[in-house]
Amino acid sequence: MNQKRLLHGSLWGLILGVVCVLGAMLRAGEVLSFEYLFAFWYNRLLMGIVIGLFPVWTFRESLIRGAVIGLLVSFAFFSATSYQDWIGFLFGAIYGMIVEYSLYKAK
C-alpha cells in the first residue's frame, strides 16, 4: 500500500466533500440537516480513501477506475436518498476522476 497515495486521496476526498456540501446547500430549496450534509461529506471522504488504496495504473485506466469507484461509492449515498439525488450520484464519477487525476499527477 502506498501511504502517500492514501494520504493524498484522503485529502482530496475531504476537500471534494466540502465542495459537495456547499453545492448541495446551494441547489437545495430547503435547509438540509446536519446528518444529510455530514453523510454527503463522509461519502466523498470515503471515495478518496478507497481510490487512494489502489495502485497506480496508466492514465486512461486510472480515470476510468476513478469514475467507476466514484459511482460505486456514491451509490451508497444515492440509495439512502431514495434514489432522488441524481446530481450527487453522477458527480461521484466526476469527483472520482478528479481524485485519480490528482493522484496520478502526484505520483
Image: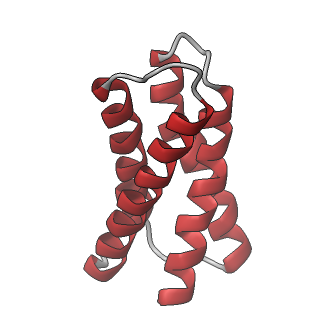
User: Left or right of 15: which side holds 70?
Assistant: right
Front in this rendered view, residue 4 or 39: 39
Q: Residue furthest top?
A: 82
Q: Position of residue 9 (x, y in %)?
A: 39, 68
User: Left or right of 14: which side holds 72?
Assistant: right
Q: How many marks?
A: 0
What residue is at 60 percent from the left and 40 percent from the top? 71
Front in this rendered view, residue 23 or 8: 23
Q: Position of residue 45 (x, y in %)?
A: 36, 52
Front in this rendered view, residue 30 or 65: 30
User: Left or right of 9: which side holds 72?
Assistant: right
Quadrant location, the N terminus: bottom left
Q: Position of residue 23 (x, y in %)?
A: 56, 43
* Residue 5, quarter of the rendered image: bottom left
* Residue 84, quarter of the rendered image: top right
**Display coloring:** secondary structure
What residue is at 37 percent from the left and 25 percent from the top? 36
Q: Position of residue 31 (x, y in %)?
A: 44, 22
What residue is at 54 percent from the left and 77 percent from the top? 102
69 to 89, vertically: above or below? below
9 to 28, vertically: above or below? below
17 to 39, vertically: above or below? below
User: Left or right of 6: which side holds 70?
Assistant: right
86 to 54, vertically: above or below? above
What residue is at 60 percent from the left and 15 percent from the top? 83
